[in-house]
């Protein structure tokens, strides 16, 4: 039986302790250079003489990147490996190192200098992780951004326990791809470990380029005026001097693929996750900004109280998609209840109670925005991009071009046929020209991603063209009322030459739209009204930002409504006088030559009145539907918009069929083209045969009579052409 000798046992224990101490010490890899120094490659011209590179330490110029981390010691000495073939390895992932190794800064990058060793002599790996905030800062959930810690505090304490091998910590915001989803975790809610250079969070693994770590600032401590904030001299390499200011746990920011949105709620930002939106003077751009979004989520499926408020839900984790490039318009919940929105905690969809609709994260975006009205979080909806919306968009665009073609043909016919260039004909040309310009402008903004410098003036050109369209329709209604509805109107107008009449008409029909356009431009550009009534022209598209908004109703549809109302009054007055003239004609004796001339004149004016009536009904009814659907908009009445859009987009076709698609007009066109004169008095051409018994007045007398258009009558009844 052997007896243990106490002295031998003591020696054995000492050796074990020395081995453990050496092993622990070996895990702390030294820095290559003293504090305030960096590595430089000094091989230079001697590269031909040596098969390896030479390095030395020199004082650092300026204030370069500092090397710090975990299990890294700086004994303020030169620790460059002393071997003939020193190898410099850039650290961008786990790198195995031997005993004779060091870490340093070379050309602003982190490098390990080591001597080649046998694999069995490798003692540890050096890793590299990213700190989300700059050195000396921690993340504040109150401010939603990085906040400074007391002087000399690095803020690494909270996640130091993750690493049991040498690890370099470098600071800087996480750079995720624009297609990635940014997801923030709190370590207190998940199991977190660091294995083989990857961070494991729950069931997900992230390489060193896909995550960053950050300590969390205790906002209650900082608000209470903790003495550490006033300045503390407490300092340790890992920043323990600020530990009282830090909350337990730490933030983990990660880059995910879009597939993560199948498991968690995801919202979409308009810009990148490290940017904000700036809207000033009609321009919108994304600029760098460190502040994150604060998103409130709600349980849309359950109501909290009788007022219709939804239950607030705080999810453990949610994702942030980046970069929404669709044409969009802002929601204004602070000015309109119909724009109030909520984010659903289940999938991150945006819910509009006014419409009872959910918008997926591909159909909206939300962003910190800096505008002329201050800093605020704003939500934007994309214009309809669904398959149904795209079909409607294509049909709408095709309709605009078809109408433009028919309006162009109407203008061409009336310009090329001299017999049609009377006062009503000129009025019609100006009306059709204004409408065609508006439709072409609408087509352009539908199919072009125009810059603001082009989009903004184009929007006001379209606005002016629409106003001019209705102003000229107003002139057409006034002209037929004055001619046919006023008992003294004809004698009054006969005192003017036709050019004078048309000049007065032009001053009104171009002047009124110019006034409306100037007023709207000044209000929009100089922000002369509250945001609730601000036109927001050019915001998201080259028109009013929302066609169901109060500004669109006030500045566009209200002037149109006034002109339509005026036309309605003129229509009723003209109809009354038409019936009165008809009764007076039939009371006159049948042999009276005055009766026959008045009857012919009445028939001619009535025909023109009926044409204007058709145009008024087509334009007036469709735009009245537009006004009603905007003023009393609800999702259940969206069909009214489809009806009004259908009539509005095809108005050019209606104008052509009302004013050109007439047999007598076609006869005049054929005559102008020299195809051959047709006997328009032939029954087959659709006219009444004139016989000597009914034609009491001679043709010479007819030529001396003036029609309501201010032109002599001809054998083909020129006044019936308009």
Image: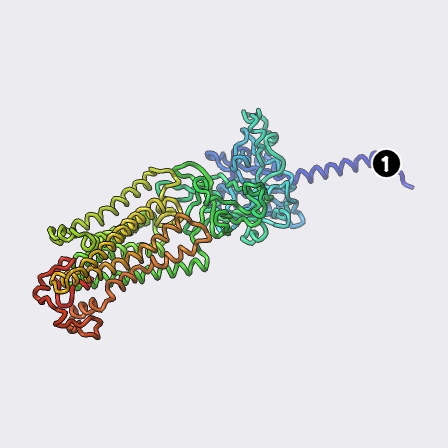
Name the quadrant containing residue 674: bottom left
Instruction: Give the answer, above or below, for where 459 lies relative to 653.
Output: above
For the point 10% across and 64% down, the residue is 702
Query: Is residue 168 something that shows in the picture?
Result: no
| Frontmost residue, 559 versus 280 | 559
> Neighbour class for label 1 at 10 Å: few (<14), some, many (≥20)?
few
For the point 21% across and 62% down, the residue is 412
> Which quadrant does the N terminus fall into?
top right
Query: Is residue 526 something that shows in the picture?
Result: yes
For the point 43% across and 57% down, the residue is 389
| Frontmost residue, 72 versus 243 | 243
Q: Position of residue 576 (x, y in %)?
A: 24, 54
Q: Is residue 716 left or right of residue 8?
A: left
Q: Which residue is mark 1?
A: 5
Instruction: Give the answer, above or below, for where 138 lies relative to 646.
Output: above
Q: Position of residue 658 (x, y in %)?
A: 26, 63
Q: Position of residue 58 (x, y in %)?
A: 50, 36
Q: Position of residue 164 (x, y in %)?
A: 65, 41
Instruction: Give the answer, above or below, for where 413 lies relative to 232.
Output: below
Disc 1, SS: loop
């Amino acid at each position: 039986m052997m007896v243990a000798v106490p002295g031998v046992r003591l020696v054995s224990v000492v050796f074990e302790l020395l081995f453990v101490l050496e092993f622990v010490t070996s895990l702390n890899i030294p820095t290559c250079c003293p504090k305030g120094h960096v590595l430089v490659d000094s091989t230079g011209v001697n590269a031909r003489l040596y098969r390896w590179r030479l390095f030395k330490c020199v004082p650092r110029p300026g204030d370069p990147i500092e090397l710090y981390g975990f299990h890294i010691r700086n004994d303020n000495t030169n620790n460059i490996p002393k071997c003939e073939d020193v190898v410099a390895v850039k650290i961008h992932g786990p790198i195995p190192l031997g005993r004779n190794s060091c870490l340093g800064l070379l050309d602003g990058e982190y490098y390990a200098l080591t001597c080649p060793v046998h694999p069995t002599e490798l003692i540890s790996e050096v890793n590299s992780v990213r700190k989300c905030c700059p050195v000396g800062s921690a993340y504040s959930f109150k401010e939603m951004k990085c906040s400074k810690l007391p002087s000399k505090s690095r803020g690494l304490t909270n996640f130091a326990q993750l690493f049991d091998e040498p690890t370099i910590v470098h600071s800087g915001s996480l750079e995720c791809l624009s297609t990635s989803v940014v997801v923030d975790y709190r370590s207190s809610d998940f199991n977190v470990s660091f294995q083989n250079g990857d961070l494991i969070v729950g069931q997900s693994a992230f390489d060193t380029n896909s995550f960053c770590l950050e300590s969390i600032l205790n906002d209650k401590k900082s608000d209470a005026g903790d003495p550490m904030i006033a300045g503390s001299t407490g300092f340790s390499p890992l920043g323990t001097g600020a530990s009282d200011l830090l909350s337990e746990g730490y933030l983990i920011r990660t880059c995910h693929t879009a597939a993560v949105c199948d498991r968690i709620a995801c919202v979409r930002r308009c810009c990148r996750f490290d940017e904000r939106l700036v809207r000033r003077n009609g321009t919108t751009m994304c600029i760098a900004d460190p502040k994150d979004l604060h998103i409130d989520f709600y349980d849309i499926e359950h109501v909290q109280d009788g007022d219709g408020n939804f239950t607030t839900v705080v999810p453990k984790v949610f994702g942030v998609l980046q970069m929404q490039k669709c044409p969009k318009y802002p929601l204004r919940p602070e000015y309109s209840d119909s724009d109030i929105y909520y984010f659903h905690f289940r999938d991150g969809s945006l819910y509009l109670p006014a419409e009872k609709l959910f918008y997926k994260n591909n159909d909206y975006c939300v962003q910190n925005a800096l505008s002329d009205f201050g800093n605020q979080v704003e939500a934007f909806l994309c214009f309809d991009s669904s398959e149904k919306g795209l079909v409607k968009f294509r049909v709408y665009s095709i309709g605009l071009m078809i109408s433009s073609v028919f309006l162009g043909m109407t203008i061409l016919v009336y310009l090329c046929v001299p017999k049609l260039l009377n006062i009503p004909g000129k009025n019609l040309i100006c009306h059709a020209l204004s409408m065609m310009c508006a439709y072409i402008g609408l087509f352009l903004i539908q199919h072009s991603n125009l810059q603001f410098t082009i989009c903004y003036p184009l929007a006001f050109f379209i606005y002016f063209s629409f106003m001019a369209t209705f102003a000229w329709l107003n002139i057409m209604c006034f002209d037929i009322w004055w001619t046919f509805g006023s008992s003294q109107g004809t004698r009054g107008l006969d005192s003017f030459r036709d050019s004078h009449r048309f000049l007065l008409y032009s001053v009104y029909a171009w002047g009124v739209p110019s006034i409306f356009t100037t007023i709207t431009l000044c209000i929009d550009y100089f922000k002369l009204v509250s945001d609730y009534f601000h036109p927001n022209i050019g915001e998201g598209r080259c028109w009013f930002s929302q066609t169901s908004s109060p500004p669109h109703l006030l500045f566009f549809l209200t002037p149109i409504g006034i002109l339509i109302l005026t036309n309605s009054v003129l229509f009723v007055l003209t109809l009354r006088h038409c019936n009165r003239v008809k009764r007076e004609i039939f009371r006159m004796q049948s042999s009276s030559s005055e009766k026959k001339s008045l009857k012919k004149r009445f028939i001619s004016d009535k025909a023109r009145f009926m044409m204007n009536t058709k145009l008024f009904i087509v334009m007036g009814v469709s735009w009245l539907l537009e006004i009603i659907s905007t003023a009393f908009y609800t999702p259940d009445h969206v069909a009214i918009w489809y009806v009004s859009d259908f009539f509005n987009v095809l108005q050019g076709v209606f104008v052509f069929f009302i004013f050109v698609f007439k047999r007598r007009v076609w006869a005049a066109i054929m005559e102008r083209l020299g195809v051959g004169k047709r006997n328009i008095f032939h029954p087959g051409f659709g006219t009444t045969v004139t016989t000597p018994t009914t034609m009491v007045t001679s043709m010479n007398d007819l030529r001396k009579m003036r029609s309501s258009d201010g032109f002599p009558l001809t054998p083909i009844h020129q006044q019936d052409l308009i």
